[in-house]
Amino acid sequence: MNQNLLADIWNVLSDHIPEKVKGDVAQEFVTTLLDYGIAESTLEGMLGIDTYLDTAIEYAIDEEPGEDEEWDD
């Protein structure tokens, strides 16, 4: 799937999402895309479409796997 198609899907959906939950929905959208193997570079290409989506993408990309884990030495 290319970033233009994903951006269009988000735009169609976001027009029908109440403002108060749009951030949560954006986060779930991005998480779902990552779960299905959409590349981070594709997500980065979607930056600038919507502020809620930007926040969700930046959060997902900045979060490294295992970042919150503490290692016992």
Image (tube, rainbow, N blue to C red):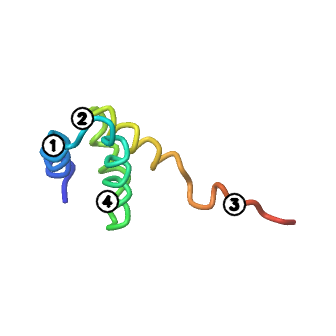
Seen at 35% across and 54% down, the residue is 28
Instruction: Assess whether mark 1 and mark 3 are in contact (beta carbons under 8 angstroms).
Output: no
- Dot in front, 3 or 1: 1
**Dot 2 or dot 3, earlier in sequence:** 2
Q: Position of residue 63 (x, y in %)?
A: 54, 50
Q: Earlier in the sequence, mark 4 or mark 1?
A: 1
Count residues near mark 4 (Cα–Cα under 10 Å), then give few for <14, some for 14-19, many for 20+: some
Query: Which image quarter holds the C terminus?
Result: bottom right
Q: Residues within 10 Å of mark 3 (few under 14, many from 20)?
A: few
Going from the N terminus, do you reach mark 3 or mark 1 first?
A: 1
Q: CA distance from mark 4 to mark 2?
A: 16 Å
Check disc 2 and report its element: helix, strand or loop: loop
- Residue 68 located left or right of residue 30: right
Pointer 2 with pointer 1, Cβ within 8 A: no
| Disc number placed over residue 33 in the picture, else none | 4
The residues bearing labels 4 and 3 have C-alpha atoms spaced at a distance of 23 Å
Between tags 4 and 1, which lies in front? 1
Disc 1 target residue = 16
Q: Secondary structure at mark 4?
A: helix
Contact? badges 4 and 1 (CB < 8 Å): no
Sooner in the amino-acid sequence: mark 4 or mark 3: 4
Residue occupied by mark 2: 49
Figure quadrant of residue 38: bottom left
